[in-house]
Image: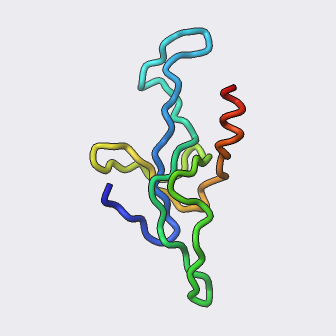
Amino acid sequence: MKFRPLHDRVVIRRAEGDTKSKGGIIIPDNAKEKPQEGEVIAVGPGARDEKGALVPLDVKAGDLVLFGKWSGTEIRIDGEDLLIMKEADIMGVIERAVEAKKAA
């Protein structure tokens, strides 16, 4: 991908939604609810404070993040659907160690 976001913007790849319900019913793509988590693909250099100093972002490429249901703008780059949003729209970072415990 040859896209670099500006300022405090972040590019996110949405996590894949479930294709089956808990009861085993297959859910078609148009009826799926979009997941509210995804992986950070690229980040901008950061925002500027009142004095003009660069404030770096708290997230980095590779982080798994949780964001609001209607956050960001959907874009398509190289045939891939991505989201671009400001860092302020991200609610938090999901720690991988916690995720691994849930899978076990």
For this orientation, the residue located farthest to the left is 78
At a point 55% along the width and 75% down the height, the residue shown is 47
At a point 56% along the width and 88% down the height, the residue shown is 52
At a point 48% along the width and 17% down the height, the residue shown is 27
Report x, y in % for residue 95: 67, 46
Q: Which part of the image, by quadrant, shows the C terminus?
A: top right
At a point 62% along the width and 64% down the height, the residue shown is 58
Would you place residue 22 above or below residue 63 in this image? above
**Residue 34 located left or right of residue 65:** left
Q: Which part of the image, by quadrant, shows the N terminus?
A: bottom left
- Count of all numbered marks drawn on residues in the image: 0
**Residue 90 located left or right of residue 40:** right
> Which quarter of the picture shows residue 42?
bottom left
Image coloring type:
rainbow
Would you place residue 37 above or below residue 5 in this image? above
Report x, y in % for residue 36: 58, 40
Considering depth in this image, is 41 or 103 the residue closer to the camera? 103
**Residue 76 located left or right of residue 14:** left
Considering depth in this image, is 59 or 87 the residue closer to the camera? 59
Report x, y in % for residue 56: 58, 73
Would you place residue 56 above or below residue 76 in this image? below
Considering depth in this image, is 71 or 47 the residue closer to the camera? 47
Report x, y in % for residue 63: 57, 51
